[in-house]
Image (cartoon, grey):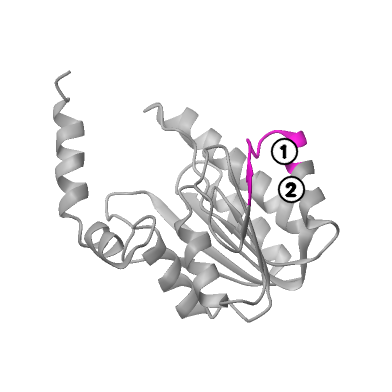
Amino acid sequence: MARSKSSSLWLKEHFSDPFVKRAQAEGWRSRAVFKLEELIDRDRLLKPGMTVVDLGAAPGGWSQMVRERLRDSGRIVALDILPMAGLGGVEFIEGDFREEAVVKRLESVLDGAGVDLVLSDMAPNISGVEDADQARAMHLVELAQEFAAVHLKPGGAFVVKLFQGRGFDEYLKNLRKAYERVSMRKPKASRARSAEVYAIATGKK
């Protein structure tokens, strides 16, 4: 089957992308690790012995990076609607975070343990209908924020991927009420044409 012009352009861009090449050369699961690497270095998000929850984890690059940085200390629980190949030192739950039963499974795995850092790189499948896509994206980030509100320890941190559009400003306003400090970041590995940005919320009140 012939590829569409847009998918051919995407493939050309993807395979000439320096972050894709670097990820392949260094054995990382995705180019997205370099977004997280910049965020955790700039905002000093990781400390030995932490419990970290990674939402929207597949193919596992972020969990891989956190495991590498924490070495043998701490605990990482990853969740995604997509399957993910096993990763040493990472507990993985396959399921849809929008479903209450899946969130309950995650809570059961945590077994009451407080979480130090919640990472959310979740994004909906894009339909191309801007308003609908933005609404779905905001629903996911609201669920992630609710999870962090319940499970993060006081002083904990929350990193969430956001798409600029309807609901964005209100969401940030709510984050600022719940955390001591909220910073916006656009990592170098984020494609310039993407509307994605990351909110780094630290010091949960």
Label 1 secondary element: helix
Residue at 79% in and 42% down: 104
Q: In which quarter of the image is the C terminus?
A: bottom right
Left or right of 176 on screen, residue 166: left
In the visual, does 155 lie left or right of 5? right
Q: Position of residue 63 (x, y in %)?
A: 53, 61
**Is residue 12 shown above or below 71?**
above
Query: Label 2 to label 1, Cα distance in Å?
Result: 6 Å
Q: Give the range drawn in magenta.
A: 92-103
Quarter holding the N terminus is: top left
Can residue 186 be seen in this snapshot? no
120 or 65, which lies in front? 65
Q: Can residue 55 be seen in this view?
A: yes
Residue drawn at the location 65% of the way across and 60% of the way down: 175
Residue topped by disc 2: 106
Q: Is mark 2 on a helix, strand or loop?
A: helix
Does residue 100 belong to the magenta stretch?
yes
Q: Give amino acid for label 1.
A: Val
Residue type at mark 2 is Leu
- Position of residue 194 measured from the top left corner of the image (x, y, whole percent): 33, 49
On screen, residue 133 versus residue 104, left or right, reads left
Name the residue nearer the viewer: 181 or 64: 64
Comparing 137 with 55, the one in front is: 55
Residue denoted by label 1: 102
Res. 22 image quadrant:
bottom left
| Tag 2 near tag 1, CB within 8 Å | yes
Towards the viewer: 146 or 25:
25
Q: Residues within 10 Å of mark 2 (few under 14, many from 20)?
A: many
Q: Residue at x 53, y 68 (%)?
A: 66
Image: 124 above or below 149: above
Instruction: Decide: few, some or many residues near mark 1? Use Cα within 10 Å; few <14, some 14-19, many ≥20.
Output: some
Task: Answer whether residue 20 is magenta in the image.
Answer: no
